[in-house]
Amino acid sequence: MGVVGHNGAGKSVLLKILARVIRPTQGRVEIRGRVAPLLQLGTGFHSDFTGRENMYLNGTILGMGRPEINRKLDEIVAFSGIAEFLDTTHHILSKRNAHAAGVCHGRASGP
């Protein structure tokens, strides 16, 4: 989803409301399904954890349960392109690989 508007139009506020980071001061928002915001790439990853451990941590942050992560792990790993580094600590990964892992979680947690 993309939101376009002038500075000060409320784009960031709208996205924070949709992500349930803040509540609207007026009106209401109805969300059907799951919202998995990527507030910042790399959020939800711990540098001392392996790629595999971080997959479970980030999936949990995005509202996925362990069974769902287990079902989607192969897809997440394949999409991220970090299979050979899956059991390596996160701080060893390049920025590109770390960002790919973050994006693939957002993709896997979607509809």
Image (spheres, rainbow, N blue to C red):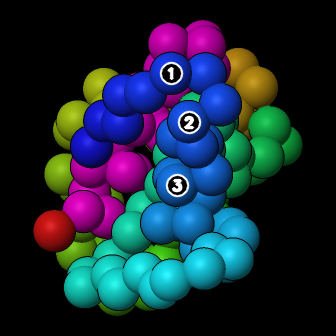
Q: Amino acid at mark 3?
A: Leu
Whether residue 107 is visible to the viewer of this picture, yes or no, is yes
Q: Which residue is mark 3?
A: 14
Q: Are marks 1 and 2 in contact (CB under 8 Å)?
A: yes
Q: Nearer the viewer, residue 10 or 111?
A: 10
Q: Between marks 3 and 1, how big is the CA–CA gap?
A: 13 Å
| Residue occupying the point 62% across, 51% down | 13
Q: Where is residue 5 shown, x and y percent of the image?
A: 43, 27
Q: Which mark is residue 9?
A: 2
Q: Where is residue 108 shown, x and y percent of the image?
A: 26, 57
* Mark 3 vs 2, N-terminal side: 2
Answer left or right for 15 relative to 68: right
Q: Amino acid at mark 1?
A: His
Give the class, few, some or many, for how many residues have Cα within 10 Å of label 3's Cα (few <14, many ≥20): some
Answer left or right for 37 relative to 93: left
Give the class, few, some or many, for how many residues have Cα within 10 Å of label 1's Cα (few <14, many ≥20): few
Give the class, few, some or many, for how many residues have Cα within 10 Å of label 2's Cα (few <14, many ≥20): few
* Mark 3 vs 1, N-terminal side: 1
| Residue occupying the point 21% across, 38% down | 78
Whether residue 52 is visible to the viewer of this picture, yes or no, is no
**Range shown magenta:** 93-110
Q: Which residue is mark 1?
A: 6
Magenta part, dominant SS = helix
Q: Quadrant of the N terminus?
A: top left
Q: Are marks 3 and 2 in contact (CB under 8 Å)?
A: no
Q: Nearer the viewer, residue 38 or 79?
A: 38
Q: Amino acid at mark 2?
A: Ala
Secondary structure beneath dot 2 equals loop
Secondary structure beneath dot 1 equals loop
Q: Quadrant of residue 84?
A: top left
Within the magenta stretch, is there residue 108?
Answer: yes
Q: In the displayed structure, would residue 39 be above or below residue 20?
A: above
